[in-house]
Amino acid sequence: ESTVYSLNPSNHNSSPASLVAMKLPPGARKVTDFESTVYSLCSKVPPGCVTTYGEIAAALASSARAVGQAMRRNPFAPQVPCHRVVSADLKLGGYFGATGPQSSLVKKKQQMLVDEGVEFEDPLTISNKSLFKFDTKLQPSSGRGKRDAKAQVCQPCRSQGKAAPKKGARKA
C-alpha cells in the first residue's frame, strides 16, 4: 500500500506546514518510491505558482522526462497538484498524458491555473512571475543522488506576503 504526504492545500503557508497522508484510490497501481518523492515535492508548489519538470528533476537529481512520466501517472490529482508543473519554456505542456492546445484535458489544466491566479503571457504561456523554484544548492540527502529541496517563493506569493511552504515529511 502506497502513502504519499502532501501539503494540506488550505494551509500551504502555515508554519510548520500541515501534511496529510493520501492513500491510493481503489484499483490504482502501486506508486514507486521515485513517484512518491516527485509527488511530495510537487505538493510544495503553492496555488498561483507553477514549476517546471526540469526544476523538479534538478531537485531530485533526475530527468525531466522521468518527472513527466510520474506526473502522467499521478493517482492523487488534484490533491497532488501536477497541473502546476509545466514545460521549461513555460508552456502548459500536457495533462494526464494529453497534449496540444485543443485537448480538453490541457484546457482543464489551463482553467485550473487561471482559477488559482497564475499569470499568463498568452493563453498557453505562463508568465515568469508565477515561476516557483526550489533551492537545490543543498548537500545530497539520503542516498541515490536525491537532494533535499527547499521551497522558494514565486512572485505572486511574495506580492501577497505569503511565505514558502515548509519542507515536508517523507514517506515513513
Image (cartoon, rainbow, N blue to C red):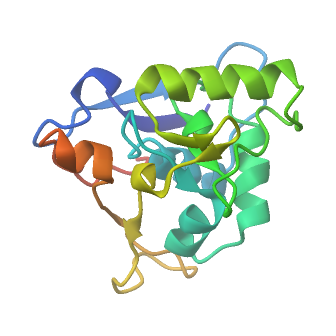
Residues 89 and 140: in front is 89
Residue 93 in the figure: left or right of residue 58: right
Percent x, y of residue 70: 72, 48
Can residue 168 be seen here?
Answer: no
Report the residue at 50% width, 46% height from top: 50
Residue placed most toward the observer, 138 or 54:
54
Residue 55 quadrant: bottom right
Residue at 77% from the left image edge and 29% from the top image edge: 106
In-front residue for pair 1/14: 14
Residue pictured at 41% horizontal, 63% vertical: 133
| Label total for image | 0
- How far across and how far down the image is residue 168, in percent? 31, 49
Q: Is residue 95 visible?
A: yes
- Side of 147 where 60 appears, left or right: right
Q: Quadrant of the N terminus?
A: top right
- Kindly indicate the quadrant of the structure image that contains residue 30: top right
In the image, residue 94 above or below residue 57: above
Rendered position, 77 above or below 137: above
Residue 159 point in image, percent of width and height: 19, 45
Outermost residue to the front: 122
- 135 horizontally vs 42: left or right: left
Residue situated furthest top in the rendering: 26
Residue 105 position in % (x across, y down): 79, 22
